[in-house]
Image (cartoon, grey):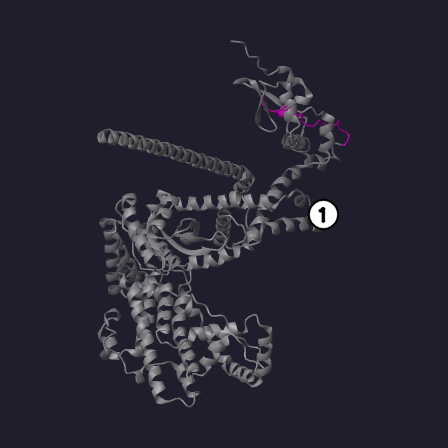
């Protein structure tokens, strides 16, 4: 076999000034190592030509220029006669005192370099030339430029700017600040901004969140879905509630988003178990969601799955989101009346939407510049301003329609016809007034519980208050006193007030006084429809509200208004402890200790006084932690830990609903899923830190994350490329297998056909022989 000649490393190259960046590879004599680019160079085939080729590369040239223009920090230091070092700025300050002394040479590179460092070919003269111009501040410019890039990207994310806006904004900043060294150093193309946000800052804040979650023993997971119009998939946002040990309070944070096609219970299960780590899954205390049946089925299946992971622990069930329940119940009650208020409100808005001619005619006919507001089909209880505006402009709309009929310029659209038909109803204003009055009584609940504060202990009393207020309108007072709210039979006519006696509210009664020529039979029918609306609303609440779940009532023992009543609060605490023990979240021994500590602390006179002074504007977790710390944390360790478990329980999906609004702001054409997730993670982290970018501290680890962003981005691209190649390879293999199977099937068919023909010929021959 002929001998193969290979080129090996030549030690003389190290002495060559042009190849000062070359070093040998101890484990491979046929390779060299570039100390600038940090990559190996294979010599076996090309020898020195391989070095020349590498030297002419774009990356190597850039690194060489960077080395020449960027000096090590020790070039700014000066060696004193006693061997100590001083900075160049200090040398300048003491210039007058040592003006007559002989100049001290700047420390040569070779004096401080390690054996692996490259000794540059530059002379002391070249170093002296730079040393007069540079000081320590020069070496901080790069950090300052990176900080500027980070803050620029964070500001853009919070303002939901596009990547092109980031790039163009920086170009304008360089024009505005031509003398700024930092702005000159900042480089943010749209591609760099993209990977800096997704793989640098997004990853940094995600790691921060994960480190916080690792410190927690339990957490609550919430999820909700909405359509992502860019990817055309169902986007399922996931948020977590946990006890933040750094802030010592409950924190609600965005975790991630999953993008799904189908959203069956099995699809949700697969998405959860495949994308969330098991360490997180086994900590789940509760799952917060809205009320579709598919979600209920998912939670049921998830409970079975988590039993194996979490050690036979059970999820606590506080029902579905109370906010969704009230919106849905109100919608069901109003639509049951057949008043057709919703088509009217929508048609009223659409009649003047984007039609300048009609708007001008309306202003001319009525003299009013007030126009209808848009009806919200999702959050029904937020339509109070819509109804108020509709009631205010009803007289003006009538004038507009009269003018249209008089001038014979009737708009030929369905909205005009609906509005005209609705205005023929003499009780239209009264019906709108009832809608407004009814919704106004429920709105305070929504306003209060659209918060991330720990409000679960208030949930029972708040829902009960809404039910009591509504039922007092149409249920007999003696029935309300005799039975609990959940035990009253609303289908039984004897329990209800007569239609003429129900409470319609002051707003509705006032509207009645301004209504003329209404028949008594119409008034009677209207009152019956109002009673039906109220009854259906309450029935719907009782079916799906949190009141039917014992844990909701039990944890109200942490509501100061209940805790001040010793017997009642202790009874509810006992129920809560039983549920937690039964669900394997605490042991029986811990429950006994919690019970003793709770009874001891609420019986203290100072604590009773604190309960009386408590205001709902104060966070409940802060209130209880201060109480415990005030009376000795060590004495109430078990109560403190149990309080944290109760405080993180979710009272609704308001945080996720707000997230959908942020999603809409972030969405851009051709946006990738990772980009949206990265922006959401950053946005959530900045809000959690006070939403104050001007005072944000850019840490060293954040700078490192920004500088490593490109490497992580390249790694992700390589991984995706490899996955695509493997997928294509698998696809091609399947394709080849299918083609081979098809060919074999064809051969089999052909052989079978030939065999059949031969068999038929033999059969014919046999038949001929038999005829002879």
* Number of numbered discs overlaid on the protein picture: 1
The part of the chain drawn in magenta is 99-119
With 637 as the anchor, is 126 left or right in this view?
Answer: right
Tell me which residue sits at (42%, 90%) in the image: 517
Residue 464: percent from left, percent from top: 31, 69
Q: Residue furthest front?
A: 772
Label 1 environment density (alpha carbons within 10 Å; few <14, some 14–19, many ≥20)? few
The answer to whether residue 19 is visible is: yes
Residue 71: percent from left, percent from top: 66, 32
Magenta stretch, overall SS: loop
Q: Is residue 280 above or below residue 596?
A: above
* Magenta stretch holds residue 700: no
With 537 as the anchor, is 701 left or right in this view?
Answer: right
Point out the image quarter for the C terminus: top left
Specify the quadrant of the image occupied by residue 521.
bottom left
Disc 1: which residue: 178
With 70 as the anchor, is 540 left or right in this view?
Answer: left
Given residues 395 and 725, the one toward you in this image is 725
* Magenta stretch holds residue 104: yes
């Amino acid at each position: 076999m002929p001998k193969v000649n290979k080129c090996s490393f030549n030690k003389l190259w190290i002495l060559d000034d042009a190849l000062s960046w070359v070093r040998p590879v101890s484990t491979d004599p046929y390779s060299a190592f570039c100390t600038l680019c940090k990559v190996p160079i294979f010599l076996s085939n090309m020898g020195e030509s391989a070095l020349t080729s590498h030297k002419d590369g774009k990356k190597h040239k850039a690194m060489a220029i960077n080395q020449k223009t960027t000096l090590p920090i020790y070039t700014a230091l000066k060696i004193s006669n006693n061997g100590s070092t001083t900075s160049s700025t200090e040398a300048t300050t003491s210039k007058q005192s040592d003006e007559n002394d002989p100049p001290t040479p700047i420390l040569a590179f070779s004096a401080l370099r390690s054996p692996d460092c490259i000794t540059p070919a530059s002379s002391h003269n070249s170093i002296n030339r730079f040393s007069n111009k540079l000081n320590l501040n020069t070496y901080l410019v790069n950090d300052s430029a990176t900080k500027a890039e980070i803050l620029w990207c964070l500001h853009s994310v919070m303002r939901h700017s596009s990547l092109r806006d980031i790039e163009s904004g920086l170009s304008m900043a360089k024009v505005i600040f031509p003398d700024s060294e930092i702005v000159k150093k900042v480089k943010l193309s749209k591609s760099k901004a993209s990977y800096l946000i997704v793989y640098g800052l997004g990853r940094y804040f995600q790691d921060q969140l994960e480190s916080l979650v690792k410190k927690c023993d339990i957490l609550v997971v919430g999820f909700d879905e909405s359509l992502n119009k860019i990817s055309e998939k169902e986007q399922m946002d996931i948020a977590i509630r946990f006890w933040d040990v750094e802030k010592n309070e409950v924190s609600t944070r965005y975790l991630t988003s999953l993008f799904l096609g189908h959203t069956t219970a099995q699809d949700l299960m697969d998405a959860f178990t495949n994308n969330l780590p098991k360490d997180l899954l086994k900590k789940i205390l509760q799952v917060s969601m809205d009320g579709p049946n598919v979600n209920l089925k998912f939670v049921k299946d998830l409970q079975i799955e988590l039993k194996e992971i979490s050690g036979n622990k059970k999820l606590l069930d506080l029902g579905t989101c109370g906010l969704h329940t009230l919106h849905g119940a109100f919608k069901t009650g109003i639509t049951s009346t057949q008043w057709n208020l919703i088509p009217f409100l929508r048609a009223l808005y659409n009649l003047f939407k984007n039609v300048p001619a009609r708007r001008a005619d309306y202003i001319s006919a009525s003299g009013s510049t007030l126009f209808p507001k848009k009806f919200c089909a999702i959050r029904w209880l937020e339509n109070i301003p819509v109804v108020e505006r509709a009631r205010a402009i009803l007289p003006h709309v009538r004038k507009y329609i009269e003018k249209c009929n008089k001038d014979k310029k009737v708009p030929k659209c369905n909205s005009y016809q609906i509005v005209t038909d609705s205005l023929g109803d003499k009780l239209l204003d009264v019906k709108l007034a009832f809608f407004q009055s009814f919704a106004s009584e429920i709105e305070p609940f929504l306003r209060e519980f659209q918060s991330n504060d720990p409000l679960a202990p208030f949930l029972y009393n708040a829902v009960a208050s809404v039910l009591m207020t509504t039922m007092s309108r149409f249920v007999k007072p003696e029935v309300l006193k005799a039975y609990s709210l959940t035990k009253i039979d609303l289908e039984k006519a004897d329990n209800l007030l007569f239609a003429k006696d129900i409470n319609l509210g002051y707003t509705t009664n006032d509207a009645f006084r301004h209504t003329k020529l209404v028949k008594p039979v119409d008034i009677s029918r209207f009152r019956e429809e109002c009673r039906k609306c109220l009854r259906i609303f309450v029935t719907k609440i009782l079916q799906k509200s949190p009141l039917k779940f014992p844990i909701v009532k039990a944890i109200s023992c942490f509501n100061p208004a209940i805790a001040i009543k010793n017997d009642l609060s202790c009874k509810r605490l006992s129920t809560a402890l039983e549920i937690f023990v039964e669900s394997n979240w605490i042991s029986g021994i811990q429950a006994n200790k919690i019970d003793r500590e709770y009874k001891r602390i609420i019986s203290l006179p100072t604590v009773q006084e604190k309960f009386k002074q408590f205001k709902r504007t104060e966070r409940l977790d802060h209130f209880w932690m201060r109480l415990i710390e005030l009376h000795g944390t060590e004495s109430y360790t078990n109560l403190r830990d149990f309080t944290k478990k109760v405080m993180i329980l979710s009272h609704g999906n308001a945080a996720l609903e707000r997230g959908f609004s942020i999603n809409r702001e972030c969405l851009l054409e051709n946006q990738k899923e990772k980009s949206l997730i990265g922006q959401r993670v950053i946005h959530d982290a900045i809000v959690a830190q006070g939403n104050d970018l001007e005072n944000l501290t850019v840490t060293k680890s954040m700078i490192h994350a920004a500088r490593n962003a490109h490497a992580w981005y390249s790694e992700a691209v390589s991984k995706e490329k490899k996955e695509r190649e493997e997928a294509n390879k698998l696809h091609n293999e399947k394709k080849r297998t299918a083609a081979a199977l098809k060919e074999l099937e064809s051969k089999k068919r052909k052989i079978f056909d030939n065999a059949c023909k031969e068999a038929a010929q033999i059969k014919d021959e046999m038949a001929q022989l038999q005829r002879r």
